Every structure is written in structure tokens, then in C-alpha cells.
Amino acid sequence: MAVLNFDIQDVDLSNGGVAKSVSLSGSIDASTNQLFESQLDDILSSGTNRVMLVLTKVKYINSTGLGTIVKCVDNFREQQGDIKLVGVPTKVIALFEMLGLLALFETYDTIDDAIASFAEGGDGDAAPVQPTAQFPIQFKHPKSGMALNVTQPGRFKDPRSGDYFSVDQEGKIEFYEMSKIKMVDIKVPCEEHYGESLLSLTEAVTVSCGLGSIAAEITAAVQLAWTGVATNAADPLETCNVIIVGDQNKIQVGFMSYGTALDMRKDDPILAGLGNKLDDLRHVDLPNNGHLLTLVKNAQH
């Protein structure tokens, strides 16, 4: 059974306010999630509405844990507070990037940076970014069809469905239904023969999400990507974290490495070949010289 430990400290802010730092160690999954949520609920109930959630020593967060973080951030903001994430492990940042969740959180490298953001009111003296889209924006919930209206960019919660969504400066809308996500997270040696296992896992997640019709396409893309990973890896001991995330709308497969396996140029033939097989392909740099390659295949409607 997973273990989750808490170190909770009071923090005095320079503007006279008080916050709490909550340092976690262990895992946030089905066995620890209730404890995690109750601890944050207790802090909010006690009258503290500003928290720094330090994730440096968190080894694993599953989709349930991610959904709880989103929920708790929303609860704190409803009480005119916030939860700032500190020291988020690169692998979790990669997962946030894949799921589009970075727009929902404020993340900081150090607790001092998070403390300063609370003291300054979050944005300091930075001038607000002007939206390029025309607001208000009206649209329908993708599942219920109910009308929604937003007057400015930001992060929101649909009061009817309880789903969270964000709208960026360009008017792009992203919904988050964490409870419906299936996820596999595995570390794999960068050797060609491990590709067969990745294909099997990808197919299993795809089928379990009811997307069997795209299984052949996404597994073909995974096979091509893994060929590139195995070819580029200069160190025989190099490993790659592979994150497979699926729901009823799409399958995403993320490859994360700190070595040469994903050190690809924009004109790399592997990337060109993948672009022809997928609905979206992202190759981004991560903190600490890491790279993330994300393959996305949408459901066929």
C-alpha cells in the first residue's frame, strides 16, 4: 500500500498574512487520496486559505490525485485563496503538459517564489496580457450540450456538470474530466525489443477507452517513435519514462528522457513520419534538460 506523509508549517507573509506550506512525500493514489483531500479540507476549514503544496518528494500521482488537486485548488479559490504548487517533479510537469493542466495551476521552483507571489497578490506589477480573441465567448459543453458563457480568459468550473475548463487568451477552450482518464506510467530501457511491450500497453489502454478503431494507428505511431528513441539513445543504460493517457476522446502517449533518446531536430525524419500518422505531435523541452515527445490520436466520430 502506498504511503503519503505530510509536513505542515505556518508561513508568515510579508504583507501580514499567514499561509501554510504542505510538504508531501510518497504517492497520491487511490489508497492515499482521501487522506490527502481531508488534510487540505481541514486547512481550509481552519481559516487558512493560502497554501504552498510542495511536491518535490512525491514519487507518483495518478489521475484521481490530479483530479483532487484540481478540486482543492478550486475550493481554495472560491474562498479568495489559492494553492500554489512548488517543486513539481519533471515527470509530473510532463503529465500536466500532456493533459493541458498547466493552465489550471500556478507552479514555482522554490517555496520562496511561491511566498513572494502570495505577498504580491500573485501577479506583482506585471501588466495584464490582452486577449487576442473577442470576449465574451459562448459555447456548449461538449457532452451535455448546455450553453456556457465566459467574459474573460481564465480557469472555470461548470456549475452543472462540475467539470473544470480553461479559456486562454486566443479563445481556446480545454475541458478536464479527470475521473474518466485511464493512465499507465512506466520506465523503460531505451532498447528496441522493449517496443513490443509498449505496443501492447498502448493497445490495451486504447481499447479500454472504447477507441479500438484507432488502436492500429496509435500503435503504429508508438512503434515509429520507439524506433527513434532506441536509435538516438547513446548510453546503453539510458531509460525513458512513457506515459499513456486515454479517455473517450483521445489517446496520448508521452515519451520523456533526459538523455539523447529524444534530442531530435525539427526536421528529424522520425518527427516527419509521426506527423503524418497523428492528429497532434508535440516535442518540447522540459526543465533540467529533459525532452517530452507527445503523440495524440483523436477518436473517430
Image (tube, rainbow, N blue to C red):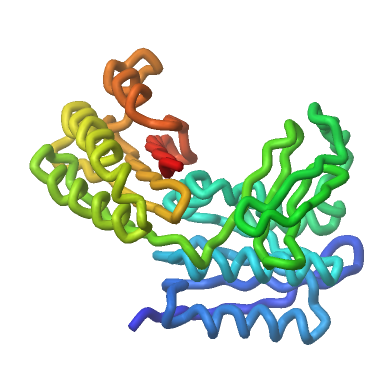
In the image, is residue 281 above or below residue 43? above
Q: Residue at x 30, y 39 (%)?
A: 218
Expressed as whole percent of the image width and height from the top left, the position of residue 91 reads 42, 51
In the image, is residue 173 above or below residue 48? above
Query: Can residue 54 be seen from the camera position used here?
Result: yes
Q: Residue at x 52, y 72 (%)?
A: 24
Query: Can residue 57 be seen from the camera position used here?
Result: no
Q: Does residue 58 appear left or right of residue 240 in this picture?
A: right
Numbered label tally: 0
Residue placed farthest to the left in the image? 193
Tell me the quarter of the picture where residue 226 sits: top left
Q: Quadrant of the N terminus?
A: bottom left
Q: Residue at x 60, y 79 (%)?
A: 37
Q: Quadrant of the C terminus?
A: top left
Expressed as whole percent of the image width and height from the top left, the position of residue 66 reads 53, 64
Q: Does residue 215 appear left or right of residue 155 in this picture?
A: left
